[in-house]
Amino acid sequence: MCRHLKVCPVFRDAATNAVFRNVKPIRTMPSAGAEMKAFISIDMEGICGVVREIETDPTKGGEAYQQSRRLMTQEGNAAIEGCLKAGATEVLIADAHWNFDNLIPDELNEAATLLRGTPRTFAMMQDLDASYDAALFVGYHAKAGTPRAILDHTYSGAIAAVRVNGVEVGETGINAYLAGHHGVPVVLVTGDRAVAAEATALMPNVHTVAVKEATGATSATNLHPTKAREQIRAETTKAVREAKAIAPLRAKTPIQMVVEFRATYAADRAAMIPTVRRVGGLRFEFKAGDYPEAFRTFYAMVTIAGGE
C-alpha cells in the first residue's frame, strides 16, 4: 500500500457546477517529517577482507575473528550512514552471523538500533515487518555450491541446496522472500561478486556492491576496506532513495520448498520434524500456506540438523 498521497487540483463541472477532487496514490519519497524505516541484515562472510572460515569463527578465530568483527561493524556503520543520508528516520540492524552477537555495540553508529543474540524465530530477518520501507543485506555470501565464491553455504554447512517453488536460492533469496511477504523490497546486497550476481538474477533492480572477487572458496582480491565502505555508503543512499521503484520479491502460495542435505546424519535429525516428507536419503519436500510458515519450517530443519 502506498503511504504517500498527492492531492490533485479541484475540478468544476460547467453544466452542473459540481465540484470534484481526485485523490490519487503515487509512489514518492517521504516528505520532510515523514517516517522512513530501514532494516539491515548483516552477515560476516561477505565483509571486505574476510576470506577464511577461521576469521568468522567466534570460538576458534582469536584475533583474526576480532578483526573481522571490527570490519563488520564498520561496514554496518557505512550502511547506517547511507540510510540516514537517504532520509531514514529509523534504522534497525540485525546481527546475522553465527550466534548473532558479532557487531561491537559501542562502536556502532548510535542512530541505529541493534538486534543481537539468539534464539530468533526468523533468524537473520527477525523483527522485519510491513512497517519497513527497505531491507538491506550487508556482508552476504553466495549459496552453497557456487564456484569462485567466498565461504559459500546456505544457512548451514549441512545444507546442499534449497529451492523455493522450483527456484534454487541461498540466504539472499530465502531472506528476500520473507521481506517480500511483508511487502518490503530488498534494495541493496553487498558481499563478493558471486553474491552480487546471485542477487541480481533474483531481483533485477536491486543495488549491489561487490567488495571482493573470489579466486576460490577461501581466496579473493579485496578492495581496501575504506574504499569498500565508501561504495557501500554511497550505494545505500541511492538504493534507499529508490526503494519505491524496487519491487518486493514475492513467492506464490502455497509455498513448495525442497531442502537437500549433504549427509544422512543431518537428514536423519531433520526427519524428526513431522511436517516434512523425506524423499530418498538426503532430500526433503514440504508445502506451506504462506512464506513465514515455510521459513519457520526450514529454519527448524536447519536448527535441529545442526551444522558441520
Image: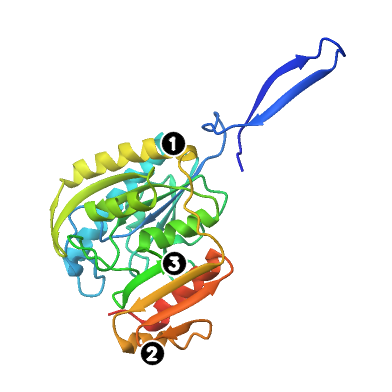
Q: Residue furthest right?
A: 16
Q: Which mark is residue 130?
A: none
Q: Nearer the viewer, mark 1 or mark 3?
A: 1
Mark 1 → mark 3, Cα distance in angstroms: 27 Å
Sequence-wise, the earlier of marks 1 and 2 is 1
Q: How dense is the environment of label 3, judged by Cα within 10 Å: few (below 14), some, or many (20 and up)?
A: many
Residue behind mark 2: 268
Badge 1 element? loop
80 versus 287 height, above or below? above
Mark 2 → mark 3, Cα distance in angstroms: 23 Å
- Kind of residue at disc 3: Ala
Residue behind mark 1: 242
Query: Along the horizontal axis of the image, is 258 left or right of 216?
Result: right
Query: Along the horizontal axis of the image, is 110 left or right of 11?
Result: left
Q: Residue at x 29, y 80 (%)?
A: 262
Percent coordinates x, y for residue 2 in the rendering: 60, 39
Residue 121 visible, this orientation: no
Badge 2 element? helix
Q: Residue at x 20, y 43 (%)?
A: 226
Sequence-wise, the earlier of marks 1 and 3 is 3
Determine which quarter of the picture holds residue 31.
top right
Q: Quadrant of the C terminus?
A: bottom left
- Kind of residue at disc 2: Asp
Using the image as rendered, state which of residue 44 and residue 285 is in the foreground: 285
- Kind of residue at disc 1: Glu
Percent coordinates x, y for residue 121 in the rendering: 50, 70
Residue behind mark 3: 123
Colour setup of the view? rainbow
Q: Residue at x 25, y 75 (%)?
A: 59
